[in-house]
Amino acid sequence: MNAKISRRGLMLVLSSPSGAGKTTISRRLLDRDPGITMSVSVTTRPMRPGEQPGVDYYFVDMPEFDRMAEQGELLEHARVFGNCYGTPRSTVEQALGAGRDVLFDIDWQGTQQLAANARNDLVSVFVLPPSGSELERRLHTRAQDSAEVIAQRMAKASDEISHWAEYDYVIVNNDVEESVVAVQAILRAERLRRTRQVGLPAFVQSVQAAL
Ligand SMILES: Nc1nc2c(ncn2[C@@H]2O[C@H](COP(=O)(O)OP(=O)(O)O)[C@@H](O)[C@H]2O)c(=O)[nH]1
Ligand SMILES: Nc1ncnc2c1ncn2[C@@H]1O[C@H](COP(=O)(O)OP(=O)(O)O)[C@@H](O)[C@H]1O
């Protein structure tokens, strides 16, 4: 049997223009891998029908968001579509220390901040749609937004996509299952990075001691 070597968790970021499929990929990944925890963000945007506080987001008002940001309670934060979004620091740090991986659905601004502050813990994946017309089709089939909101999301897509080259990995989400398998392969390899396996020195010593 393989020895259990303790490991630091990693931060897996999925970013994409709205509608490319990151929520769909994230859900399947979370269902299949009990070692991953989803980071729940705080936001000032209004709750949508069907959303649950503490599950989809923590919904807060602007003064509370500002207080959290000022007191250093957010690992990163950004303004997106006119609302504020941020990642609570404490849950992420606890998970990483306990060897659990954390999945983030955040935009390029948040990813840049994590890269600046915690590069060694970060693995970033950009999800591209197969084409512009397919992106628009997916936004329509999701049937969540008005025509006006869809037009806004399409206008924002080019801006988000312009940051693709800042990511460690890029996948084109043609087939959901293939995309999930690709992200699982990325995770599998990244978990084996020497620097993340903090229990390795002790393990190697124990192997050497018996030689
Ligand atoms: N930087 C940052 N971006 C976030 C965070 N939470 C969500 N986002 C991004 O904010 C954008 C809007 O999210 P949301 O309001 O849920 O709308 P939707 O995902 O486009 O339906 C998406 O691009 C998310 O990736 C966060 O904590 N930090
Ligand atoms: N590979 C795919 N092929 C076809 N439809 C997809 C694919 N991935 C996601 N979708 C669909 O596209 C829509 C947008 O996906 P979603 O995961 O909500 O995107 P995002 O979280 O990036 O905004 C949803 O209706 C989803 O079922």
Image (spheres, rainbow, N blue to C red):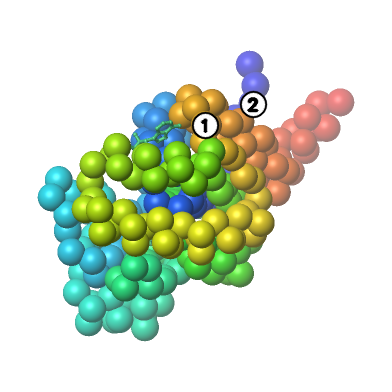
Label 2 SS? loop
Where residue 91 appears, x then y in whole percent?
A: 37, 57
In the rendered view, tell whether residue 23 sits above or below residue 13. above
Whether residue 93 is visible, yes or no, is: no
Where residue 158 appears, x then y in whole percent?
A: 51, 59
Label 1 SS? loop
Does residue 98 appear to the left or right of 168 in the view shown? left
Q: Which residue is depicted at the point 27% across and 58% down?
A: 149
Q: As shown in the figure, which amino acid type bears the numbered disc 1?
A: Asn
In the rendered view, tell whether residue 73 sits above or below residue 156. below
Where residue 103 appears, x then y in whole percent?
A: 45, 47
Q: Which mark is residue 3?
A: 2
In the rendered view, tell whether residue 172 sits above or below residue 12. above
Does residue 180 appear to the left or right of 50 in the view shown? right
> Which quarter shows the N terminus?
top right
Mark 1 Cα shell of 10 Å, populated few (<14), some (14-19), many (≥20): some
Q: Which residue is depicted at the point 72% across and 43% down?
A: 194
Q: Which residue is mark 1?
A: 174
Q: Which residue is depicted at the point 58% across and 31% down?
A: 182
> What is the residue that sits farthest to the top in this orientation?
1
User: In the picture, residue 186 is in which quadrant?
Assistant: top right
